[in-house]
Image: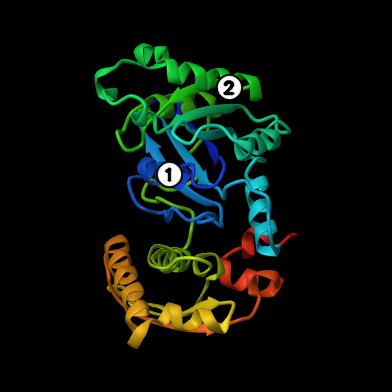
Amino acid sequence: MNNSDYRSGIVSLIGKPNVGKSSLLNFLVGEKIAIVSDKIQTTRNRIGGIVNKNNAQIVFYDTPGIHKPLHKLGKYILQVAMNALNGVDLLTVILDIEDGIFQSDKLVFNHISKSTTPVIILINKIDTVLKNLNELNEEEVFKNEVIQNFIRKINELFPAYEKIIPISVTKSYGIESYLNTVIEFLPKGHPLFSEEAITDRSIKFMISEIIREKILFLTNEEIPHSVGIYIQKFQDEHDSFDIMADIIVERKSQKPIVIGKKGSMIGKIRKLAKKDMEYLFDVKVKLELFVKIKENWRQNDKFIREYTNLVDEIKNL
């Protein structure tokens, strides 16, 4: 490798909620570092995933979906997404061809139009319109009528992009083309992280996110949006983790739902979270979970900082 040709930089993944940013990040890194759920506002924080290639290191930032906030926590989350538009080398806007382009996508383009950072657009989930995707070359994909119509809509909304790339994360299509394009936009420079690193986030952060993901997966209605996580204790004993964590809810009625009949729900949360932690960190995990009530914590600055890991992102707000 010629060091003078080595490139490194930061890329923000931008889009409306549930458009596939976290799934793409996990695929690029090759490990599950960002939690995934079909619930809106699953991603609350900016999460960095580190990808090393022969000639480059790319730090991809998964960001919260751009949305209209309904409470103070929502305002903080939106601010995190807005901050991700600045101080990076490239923006990647992700669109969902299966979902189509709606007002939420227009809101995304409205925000990024104020940025001077180069933009690449990914049309995700093209396998839903091209069932024989893996048999087609790039030219044939672009000739598809549905994709052509989709691109025309993009051009009407935001023609100032550098390149459009159709992709399918589930079919591994277009990812290498995307990575090669990203590298072209990165400045020359040394790696920002060691080659062994896969994320810029701490173990404690990852632990709290894993717990929250299991709650998102197992509960419904208002519970997923009302939950915060507070790590009471984390001891790293080299070959094992000893963890005590609080699951924070907003109302008394929510506590028995999270606990479940005879502790059935919290038992499921603990079992699934423990399994993921042991796989990701390759250690034995002792995990204790407790449910606590903090009424309307999503409207309280102090609690938002404590229960969402947003300390670094919002400390200057």
Instruction: Provide residue 55's location: percent of width, then percent of height.
Output: 40, 29
* Residue 14 in the figure: left or right of residue 277: right
For residue 153, which numbered disc appears in the image? Answer: 2
For disc 1, the marked residue is 25
Tell me the crowding category of disc 2: few under 14, some 14 to 19, or many 20 or more residues within 10 angstroms, Cα based.
Answer: some
For residue 85, which numbered disc appears in the image? Answer: none
Q: Is residue 80 visible?
A: yes
Q: Is residue 158 visible?
A: no
Instruction: Provide residue 44's location: percent of width, then percent of height.
Output: 56, 57
In the picture, the quarter occupied by the N terminus is top left
Report the mark closest to the observer, 2 or 1.
Answer: 2
Nearer-the-camera pick, 29 or 267 = 267
- The answer to whether 170 is drawn above or below residue 119 in the figure is below
- The answer to whether 211 is drawn above or below residue 119 in the figure is below
**What amino acid type should be assigned to the residue bearing mark 2?**
Lys
**Residue shown at 66%/75% (left/top)?**
296
**Residue shown at 74%/60% (left/top)?**
316
Tell me the crowding category of disc 1: few under 14, some 14 to 19, or many 20 or more residues within 10 angstroms, Cα based.
Answer: many
